[in-house]
Image (cartoon, rainbow, N blue to C red):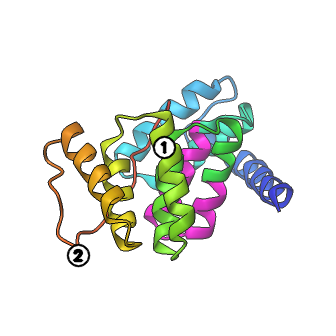
Amino acid sequence: MKGRVLAGALLLVAFATACGGAASGGSSNETAADALNRGLAAHAAGKLDEAVAAYFTTLSKDPKNQFAYYNLGEIAQRQNRVAAAQAFYGLALEQDPKMESALFNLAIIRTSAGATAEAVTLYRQVIAVDPNYAAAHFNLGLLLRQLGQTADAQTELATAQRLDPKLVAPSPSATPLQQASPTRKP
């Protein structure tokens, strides 16, 4: 399956390269970093089609660019294209298994899909990489509460609040914090 996802992503990169280039704002001497920065600017401005084209240009010049994969995943997740988001986050994690923003967003997707145990594992991976990731502690606490692991849930929620005082101990119906933002580095 991993090979099919990578092959599909590479086909998309080839397609974007064939359709992109100078017409989409890039140039033949543009570096991968330049294309990534152009993508980030378009992404921040809400010009998602331009951002996607720039991220694919980045990948055509640097096929292992975890940030381009991550940002494509973030856009796909925002557009509710769950399978694409998971695939792009997976490709980002193949490049850097400790990319906490990809792990965090993948945990949100897995939670929404009802894969609670997998989401718990992913949040724990985020916390292993960055013990001060308050939102991961918060979301993990909510999931543990849902699973009936009250003591562990309270510990996670208290840690989240200690790290970020705005994260108060939620009511039983509280919803998880949403996805991480576009990034150029983990």
User: Which circle marks residue 20 in the picture?
Assistant: none
Residue 12 location in percent, x, y?
Answer: 74, 55
Q: Report the residue at 64% width, 28% height from top.
A: 32
Q: Is residue 151 on the magenta stretch?
A: no
Would residue 154 be found to the left or right of residue 51 on screen?
Answer: left
Q: Residues within 10 Å of mark 1 (few under 14, many from 20)?
A: many
Quarter location, residue 73? bottom right
Q: Which comes sooner in the sequence, label 2 or label 1?
A: 1
Disc 2 target residue: 173
Question: Image point 65% across, 39% down: which residue?
Answer: 57
The picture places residue 174, in percent across and down from the top left corner, at: 23, 69
Q: Quadrant of the N terminus?
A: bottom right
Classify mark 2: residues with Cα within 10 Å, few (<14), some (14-19) or many (20+): few
Task: Inspect the image, locate mark 2, and give the three-letter code of the amino acid beneath it.
Answer: Ser
- Tell me which segment is drawn in magenta: 67-88
**Kind of element beneath mark 1:** helix
What type is the residue that disc 1 sits on?
Val
1 relative to 21, above or below = below
| Front residue (pair 186, 163) | 163
Question: Most extreme residue toward the front, as rendered?
Answer: 151
Label 2 to label 1: alpha-carbon separation = 23 Å
Residue 81 covered by magenta stretch: yes
Disc 1 target residue: 126
Which secondary structure, mark 2? Answer: loop
Number of numbered labels in the structure image: 2
Q: Position of residue 134 (x, y in %)?
A: 30, 43
